Amino acid sequence: MTEFIKNTALEIGFDACGIAKAGFLEEDALFLKSWLGDEFNGEMSYLERNFEKRTDPTKLVEGCKSVVVTLMNYFPASAQQAAWPKISKYAFNRIDYHTVIREKLLLLENRIKEKWGKDCFNPSQQHRFVDSAPILERRWAAQAGLGWIGKNKMLINELLGSFCFIGILLINKELAYDEPVKNRCETCRKCLDSCPTGALTENEGLDARKCISYQTIEKKGEITQEIRSKLSGYAYGCDICNDVCPWNKSRAKPNRHQEFQPLQEVINWNSDDWKNLTQEEFNRIFKYSAIQRAGYDKLKQNIDFSGVE
Ligand code: B12
Ligand code: SF4
Ligand code: SF4
C-alpha cells in the first residue's frame, strides 16, 4: 500500500512523496509555544488557535495513523522582465497553488479508496491539507524524509531545493515510514546574512513581523515604517532567503507542471503597468491567482512602497 501511494502520487503529478507516522510533535510544540510567546506571529492570530490539533494530527483527524506528504516544485521557467516591483515566484501562476494541490490530493485519495477501500479515510473530517489547516507542514515533510528544515525555515529537498509546495493527506492506516534526513545547512549562513530585515535568526525562528512576505501579504493595513525602506523591490511576498540558498542555486529546475505556467502579465509588466493597474484589471487578470490574498488596495500600496520609479 505504501508503494502504491507513492507511485500514484508521482503519476498524478507530485514531484515527491514521503510518509511519516502520525503523533504528537513534542519538540515542535515547545518551539511553537515559545515562538508564539515572543509574538513572532504578528497579527496571524489563527496560529494561536487549535494548539493541540496543530501539534498532533491524531487530534486533528480522528483515527489518523499516517501522514502522507507530497511536494510540488514551483520554480518558474521565466523570470520577471522588469526589475521592480517584484512578485514572489510562488505567485507567478494563473491558478492559485491551493486549488491545484487540493485537486491532486483528492485524486490521490480517490485512487487509494478505489484500491484499498473507503475506510482508509475519515469521512466526517477534512483530511487533505495545503497551507491553511492547523498542521505543521514543514515538520511533517521533514519527518517523512522529504528534506530538512533549513536556517531559512524552508523545507529543503535534496533534489528539488526549497521552491516546492507541501501537501498533506491524513490516512487511517499504518504504513511503512520514511526516516528523516540529515540537515545539510552545515556552516552556511547565506540566508541569515541576506535577509534585509533581520527576520531570520539561527535558533529562535523567523520573526514574521519583520518578514517582507508577512508585511506584503498577511499584515492588514500598511507596511510598517521600519520595513518599508527594506522591501528590496518586493510588492508581493519575498524570495531572498530562498534565492541565495546554494541548494536552490544548484538544484532548483523549472517546474514541468502545466498548472504552474506563469501569468504573462507578471512576467512582462513594467513598473508603469503595475502602477496603472485598475481594480477591474486586478479582478480579471488575477481572478484565480494567489495574489488575490493581498487584495487590490494592499497590492497597490505595496507597489508604491516597493520603490518603483
Ligand atoms: C504562517 C506561514 C507563513 C508566515 C510565517 C512563516 C513561518 N516561518 O512561520 C509568513 C507569512 C511569513 C510566511 C512566509 C512564507 N511562506 Co509560509 N506558511 C505559513 C504556514 C501557514 C504556517 C507556518 C507555521 O506554522 N509557522 C509557525 C512556525 C513556528 O513554524 P515553522 O517556521 O514552520 O517552524 C516549525 C518547524 O520548522 C520547527 N522548527 C523551526 N525551527 C526550529 C528550531 C528548533 C530548535 C526546533 C526544535 C524546531 C524548529 O518548529 C516549528 C513547529 O513545527 C505554512 C503552512 C502550514 N500549515 O504549515 C506556510 C508555508 C510554511 N509557507 C510556505 C511558503 C512557500 C512561504 C514563502 C516562501 C512565501 C513567499 N515567497 O513569500 C515565505 C517564506 C518565509 C520563510 N522563510 O519562512 C510553504 C513552505 C514550503 C517549503 N518548501 O518549506 C508552506 C509550507 C505552505 C505550503 N503548503 O507549501 N509563511
Ligand atoms: S522571506 Fe525575505 S524577509 Fe522573510 S525571512 Fe526570507 S529573506 Fe527575510
Ligand atoms: S542558505 Fe545556507 S544556511 Fe540558509 S537554508 Fe540554504 S544551506 Fe541552509
Image (tube, grey):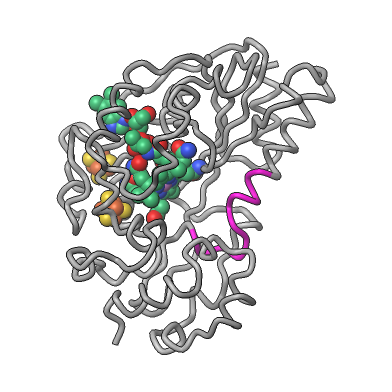
Instruction: State which quadrant residue 18 falls in.
Output: top right
**Residue 198 horizontal/vertical position (percent):** 17, 52
Asked if the stretch drawn in magenta spans residue 222, the answer is no
Task: Tell me: residue 3, above or below residue 88.
Answer: above
Q: Quadrant of ligand 1?
A: top left
Image quarter where the N terminus lies is top right
Name the residue rendered at 38%, 80% in the picture.
82
Image quarter where the C terminus lies is bottom left
**Residue 150 horizontal/vertical position (percent):** 30, 36
Count of number-bearing discs: 0
Task: Tell me: residue 86, above or below residue 52.
Answer: below
Asked if the stretch drawn in magenta spans residue 93, the answer is yes
**Residue 271 horizontal/vertical position (percent):** 38, 85
Q: Which of 87 and 27 is in front in this view?
A: 27
Q: Magenta stretch? A: 91-102
Instruction: State which quadrant residue 261 falls in.
Output: bottom right
Q: Nearer the viewer, residue 194 or 220?
A: 220
Task: Tell me: residue 265, above or below residue 26.
Answer: below
> Is residue 282 shown to the viewer in this render?
yes
**Residue 250 horizontal/vertical position (percent):** 35, 48
